[in-house]
Image: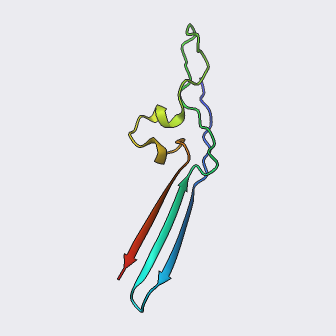
Amino acid sequence: MRGFGASQVNLAIRRDFPIREALHLQFRAETFNILNHPNFGYVDPILTDATFGQSTKMLSQSLGTVASQYQQGGPRSMQFALKFVF
């Protein structure tokens, strides 16, 4: 039995702000699954189950890692970073 296809769009933006000759501040914003597209995971393959052929978990839960928001199929999430480069 086949599962569902996975689709996810991520976006990262970076901007450098010069302070002096060799100093600058860097801002970075990253968004994972920006469209918040649902990605279904595990499909019940057992013919006698009441949920046969239905997806019972999202893809991020099916993969079984701790930080599901940053992997393929997780919910929309964002992170921001500020870095001082000298």
Between 47 and 72, the one lying in front of the other is: 72
Q: Position of residue 67 (x, y in %)?
A: 41, 43
- Of residues 4 and 86, the one drawn nearer to the viewer in this rendering: 86
80, above or below 59, in the image: below
Is residue 36 rendered to the left or right of residue 15?
Answer: right
Q: Please state if 6 lies on the left or on the right of 83 as rendered.
A: right
Q: Above or below — where is 82 with respect to 5?
A: below
The quadrant of the picture occupied by the N terminus is top right
* Residue drawn at the location 61% of the way across and 19% of the way down: 53
Query: At 50% across and 78% down in the image, what residue appears?
Result: 16
Picture quarter containing residue 63?
top left
Query: How is the protein colored in the picture?
Result: rainbow
Residue shown at the point (45%, 41%) measured from the top left: 68
Identify the residue at the far bottom of this view: 21
The percent position of residue 50, horizontal first and vertical second, equals: 58, 10
Q: Position of residue 85 (x, y in %)?
A: 37, 79
Locate the C terminus and report the quarter of the image it occupies. Answer: bottom left
In the rendered image, residue 54, in percent from the top left (x then y), is placed at 61, 21
Q: Number of labelled discs?
A: 0
Q: Residue at x 53, y 74 (%)?
A: 15
Q: Residue placed farthest to the top in the image?
A: 48
Q: In which quadrant of the rendered view does residue 31 lie? A: bottom right
Q: Is residue 21 left or right of residue 58?
A: left
